[in-house]
Amino acid sequence: MKKDYYQILGVSRNATQEEIKRAYRDKAKQYHPDMNPQNKKEAEERFKEISEAYEVLMDPQKRRLYDQYGHDGVSQTFKGGGFSWDDFTHFDDLQDILGNLFGGSIFEDFFGFGRPRTQARSKRGGDIHVILRVSLEEIVSSAKKRFRINRYERCPLCKGKGGTELTTCPQCGGRGQVRTQTRSFFGTFTSVSICPRCQGRGQVIKIPCKKCGGTGRVRVNRTIEIKIPRGVANGQYIVLKGEGHYGMGGNGNILIEFEEKPHEYFERQGYNLYLRLLVPYSRLITGGAVEIPSLNGRKDKIKIPRGSTAPQIIRVKGKGMPRPDGGRTKRADFW
């Protein structure tokens, strides 16, 4: 069983981003393999574990998914279904924390210094967060819903390369990173940073693509259609893997958050539905059936017991919201 991300970093569940970053800084220095030469393999695993926790807790969308659904909620945001260094997006933070301290060896050990950066770590495309407003009727019927997005896609002209001709970056020699030496009272320190000319790619475009201007991607408007999960509640998410922005390390995801529209008649509490019904006094005395609105577009009827008094609560089993139950879908109650 995977360990809790908050426990891994030693922070509380309501920790701020600054507190999370401070905790990661301490843990990263503690478990860097160069600080643990006698137990380097275990240190590498521990270092990867704290980096996974940092990746999730520093990303507001991933953190919200984790808080709501645990590890299952965030695993689908990773390319292979589980965390790898290709999913890590905070290399600048890592450089700030460890670059000077260890002379760049953190990049050599984990991210392939000496190779073009495109080989060592291709960046995944960004995620797209969509808030989709849905009605109770759509939730009950699991209706199909369309929405528009504007996303980056691979340039069809240059196939994502950014140009028709690439050449080795003259500044970094194709490594994607540059070393800088700084002398101080304490000695000479070597830091590693992303090459400012090729932006870490190891190659520069000799002839930029006319369509994308050398970026390798273009903006495109798309219509996405989904089927609303039956019984989905306000604030819950689904993830469309690979439908986000284009990236050389794989496409990002679309995170769809559902926002429930207020209903004219019904109030939802969990999976139960509530309706406040005004009944003539004469019907309370005599009893009988009265019509009520429903979520299926038809009029339903409920029976008022003879001699009822107001206020009175009547429970109708199986007429509430759909509720998943071990692979089956049951209906909650209507009050």
Image: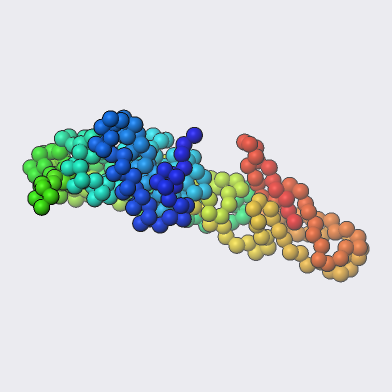
| Horizontal side, residue 114 vs residue 276: left or right | left
Between 323 and 291, the one lying in front of the other is: 323
In this view, 250 is above or below 185: above
Position of residue 223 relative to residue 290, above or below, is above
Q: Nearer the viewer, residue 155 or 78?
A: 78
Estimate the x, y position of residue 7 in percent, counting from the top left: 45, 45
Of the pair 42 and 258, the residue shown nearer to us: 42
Tell me what residue is drawn at x 66 percent, y 60 percent. 267
Closer to the camera in the image, 19 or 164: 19
Q: Quadrant of the C terminus?
A: bottom right
Q: Is residue 310 visible?
A: yes
Residue 311 % position (x, y): 81, 66
- How many marks do you count on the picture? 0
Q: Is residue 308 left or right of residue 187?
A: right
Q: Is residue 115 left or right of residue 292?
A: left
* Residue at 56% over, 55% down: 234
Q: Is residue 66 above or below residue 132?
A: above
The residue located at (58%, 52%) in the rendering is 233
Residue 54 drawn at (x, y percent): 37, 46
Q: Quadrant of residue 118?
A: top left
Q: Say if residue 144 shows up in the picture.
A: no
Q: Position of residue 86 (x, y in %)?
A: 31, 38
Colour style of the rendered protein structure? rainbow
**Which residue shows up at 37% across the image and 42% down it?**
50
